[in-house]
Image (spheres, grey):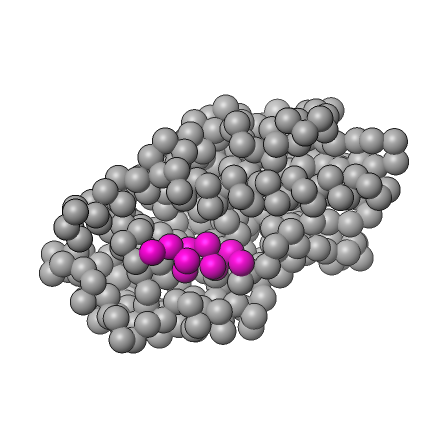
Amino acid sequence: MTFTQRLMSSAARLGRQTTKLALGVTLGAGLALALNGVPGHAQAQAVEAAPAAVRAVPAATGQGPALWVVRDADSTLYLFGTVHVLRPTTAWGSPRVDAAFDSASEIWLEISNPDDTASIMPLIQQHGISRDRPLSSLLTAEQFADLDAAARTIGLSGAAMEPMRPWLAALQLSMAPLVKAGYDPQSGVELILKARAEAAGKPLNGLETIDKQIGILAGLDEADQLAFLTETLGMFDNAATELDQLVDAWASGDVDSITRLGVDEMKAVSPAVYEALLVRRNTDWADQIQTMLEGSGTVFIAVGAAHLAGDDSVQAILSRRGVTVTTAP
């Protein structure tokens, strides 16, 4: 198989996963904030918003996003699916989610420090920059021209992005049209929950670390990274529309649509990425949840909504192990 054939095959396998990261990996919030420090990055035209700690979330229609609960004799664990970047005007406020959050003695997120750019930046420099393999040497002239055109819409150029490894260039360009469409990393659910927890003095914990999350993308082989980048360029103009559909489903508690739009497609066209992004991490988190059940008290766990949808969701894995997971009242 030639390199070109392999790249085309990888692109087909990856499918349209660019905006799926908003439901599957916290990188969208913290890493988007940190990208201002990588070579060539221009200041994003972010939506101006009040700090998360003082911002009220508009009330959702109906019950709002889905919420699950796991209980035993002395433990109550809530499972809440999130979206890592949102418009400030997205209506997802829910009294039952608020009540579950307020009742918890500790909060668990995918990572405990999604806005800690000081910790993220060295990891970006280590895993996202490769000056000896510039992007122009990895892309065709036509692909690099497309990258340059996309970069110029956010105040950059292809030349300015040359040092980035393909996964980092893809992530930056995948975030750009979302920010231009009004999506704001500061409005992501994790940052709002983090601010609320800190204001209430609730301990914050992470199910994994940011270096592990970066390793998921940085660990892809180069062909898959290039496929991610070329796919991002191909859907640059439509990324916000696709994420709009996922956010609408999430905010209304439509888990079936999240499964169809954000999980089943990944599983069908990219089994390796599906395994890395969802199955392995869901399995690890199910292990941690079972350990939490051995203790006592009330815990609120918030992870990307894609992790709580489909046949290999955290709930499904727990159910197969005999742990009862129910929809929260």
Tell me where residue 120 appears, x and y as whole percent.
52, 67
Residue at 72% across / 29% down in the picture? 323
Q: Residue 23: x, y in percent?
A: 49, 42
Residue found 48% across the figure and 69% down from its top? 123
Residue 66 visible in the displayed image: no
User: Which image quarter: residue 194?
Assistant: bottom right
> Which quadrant of the figure has residue 93?
top right
Residue occupying the point 30% across, 40% down: 13
Position of 158 with respect to 109 (left or right) is left
47 displayed left or right of 225: right
Where is residue 216? Give x, y as percent.
46, 54
Q: What secondary structure is the stretch in magenta mostly built from? A: helix
Residue that appears at 53% across and 58% down:
212
Q: Is residue 205 visible?
A: yes
Residue 240 position by quadrant? top left
Toward the left, the furthest residue is: 141
Asked whether 46 or 257 is in front, the reply is: 257
Instruction: Check the image and report above or below for 222 versus 104.
Output: below
Give percent across and percent down for residue 35: 43, 66
Start-end of magenta stretch: 212-221
